[in-house]
Amino acid sequence: MQVRFEHVRADYQLGPIRTANVINDISAELPTGTFTAIIGHTGAGKSSLLKLINGLLLPTAGEVHVGGLMINVKGEKQILNQVRKRVGMVFQFPEAQLFAETVEQDIAFGPINFGFTPEQTKQAVRESLDKVGLSADLLERSPFSLSGGQQRRVAIAGIMATSPDVLVLDEPGAGLDPEGRKKILSMLKCWHNEHKATTLLVTHDMDDVATYADNVLVLDHGRVASYQSVRQFFSDEDRLSELAIDMPEPLRVQRRIEQEKGIKLSQVSLTRSELAANLIKEQLL
Amino acid sequence: MNKLILGRYFPGESYLHRLDPRLKLVAALYFIGLLFFVENGQGYIWLFLFTFLLMRLSGVSYSVYFKGIRPLIWLILFAVMLRVMFTGGGTIYFSLGPIMISRFGLLSGFYTFSRFIMIILISTIVTLTTKSIDLTDAIHALVKPLRLMRIPVDDFALMLSISLRFVPNLLDETQKVMDAQRARGVVFGEGNLIEQMKKLVPIVLPLFVSSLKRAEEMADVMEVKGYRSGVKRSSFRQLKWHLRDGVAIICIIILTLGVSFFNNINFVLLFNI
Ligand SMILES: Nc1ncnc2c1ncn2[C@@H]1O[C@H](COP(=O)(O)OP(=O)(O)O)[C@@H](O)[C@H]1O
Ligand SMILES: [Mg+2]
């Protein structure tokens, strides 16, 4: 399912005051089945952009298209319900939304709300629990008795169980140990590949961007500062330093080697194996 | 949830912002007490003028205050209606069984209305111009004498300031959890009462869990930092009396004199008729 922003603006109303445009005239098209990383400094509007996709934040101008559905200023309930059924949203620290007595009930919450039959629900729960790498013995446990990492997986399973066409993730790895982060991200990538879901990932880690995403959208003060493929994006060194964005580790190593040896490799290395391949090709190894 | 103005703080540097919070608190209570003694139109005009002057001084626009009244307007009108319908005396314009509309009824309806509005406005002025931490300091200072009765005033003050400190966090968190459950297909404000109550569980429970977690962490941190109850402690924030606070007191005295002046005239008129 395609996601398209057309001249979208949005802000928050806090009592009597409105914040300045938190999203300021954004237009972008995310094609079906792409994996897009959204990056930008804190307060750039990343989370707000995600909330626009399922109408938790309504635009004050412009339109957000999700598949054939359109969200605008009016935010009709009918449409919002349909959109939310199609969009799965994993908030930052999603374990904060767990509430049910058992893991099973918690994962089933979304599917039941979206009108799955009991059999469909049961199957969805089991499949998604398996997808996030938790064993079925946990189904009867209380979610509050699990470890932080396990809680996060249960929360993510609760979203996957609704089989969304668009998956939206707000820093899913935040606050976990490196091992746990890596597991969660590779599992999300795997799910993305299987379901061909259009995926948006907010992250601060450029290695994650380089490893998992097809495209990068850089937000800056509520505007799109750059939107292109990951490879193009990381090739443009000047633009990177202009936007004050770090390079992924392998690329940093590559630049260092290039400096030392006074050469230029033909391709940027996004992952370690790419770096190794590039070095071998240039016969530096 | 974001509509309620009462209880919010507006950062600013106005005269009212800089007044001593103890004075503001006492003056607001005094003003509200005064409202209940005034029984004539001129007195209310005085009080309204004073209130508007304060709103002006607070540096917050009038529209903000009136938006703050709006959520409560039906409640106020209801109280006023009762007052109007069941008060007799003076010329009677209309009557039906126990219900009547009389001159006195309309007048006391107007007084009730004015009292409600001014109580809301005055309390809003105080909270808009006073940080919650200053307000707790002020309350703390004012209830200090209760210490003599072996009431643990300091502990209560600390509890109050911690609770107030976390109100915004709790509101933020409520918003976040509601968003998360909406994204999982909950539609709030639909269905019958029981269904609506059930929808509260996925919100209230996570909030409880996170509040308890935070309370526990906070207790640990305080313990580590050596907090112990029942120990005499000094305060980082010292309340100081300034010239402007004296000026404010003089203004309040003038207001009181003005209001009682009109009250007396009214008494005189009443006896003459
Ligand atoms: N619920 C809210 N109410 C008011 N302002 C908000 C709210 N959420 C975010 N903002 C403001 O919107 C801006 C963008 O925030 P956000 O979208 O969370 O940025 P990011 O996720 O990139 O850090 C920030 O300036 C923030 O203060
Ligand atoms: Mg964010």
Image (tube, rainbow, N blue to C red):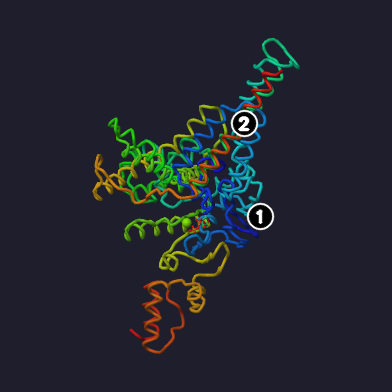
Q: Is mark 2 within 8 Å of ligand 1?
A: no
Q: Quadrant of the C terminus of chain B?
A: top right
Residue at the extreme bottom of the image, as rendered? A262
Q: Count the numbered circles shown.
A: 2
| Chain of the residue where label 2 is placed in the rendered structure | B
Depth check, front residue: A222 or B134? B134
Crowding at dot 2, Cα within 10 Å, few <14 / some 14-19 / many 20+, comes out as few
Depth check, front residue: B35 or A49? B35
Q: Quadrant of the N terminus of chain B?
A: top right
The three-letter amino acid code for the residue at tag 1 is Ala
Say what secondary structure mark 2 lies in.
helix
Q: How far is disc 2 from disc 1 in space, using C-alphas?
A: 56 Å
Q: Is residue A124 visible?
A: no
Residue at the extreme top of the image, as rendered? B97
Q: Position of residue A5 (x, y in %)?
A: 62, 58
Q: Position of residue A161 (x, y in %)?
A: 45, 45
Q: Looking at the rendering, which quadrant does residue B153 occupy?
A: top left
Is A253 positioned to the left or the right of A16 in the image?
A: left
Is B42 positioned to the left or the right of A148 in the image?
A: right
Q: Which residue is mark 1?
A: A61
Q: Position of residue B26 (x, y in %)?
A: 47, 37
The three-letter amino acid code for the residue at tag 2 is Phe
Q: From this view, report whether residue A189 is shown above or below residue B114.
A: below
What residue lies at 46% left-to-right and 80% top-to-bottom?
A267
Q: From this view, report whether residue A153 is shown above or below residue B36.
A: below
Residue A191's label in the rendered image is none
Q: Is mark 1 within 8 Å of ligand 1?
A: no
> Which of the two discs, 2 and 1, sits closer to the camera?
2
Residue B261's label in the rendered image is 2
What residue lies at 58% left-to-right and 58% top-to-bottom?
A23
Say what secondary structure mark 1 lies in.
strand
Q: Is residue B25 visible?
A: yes
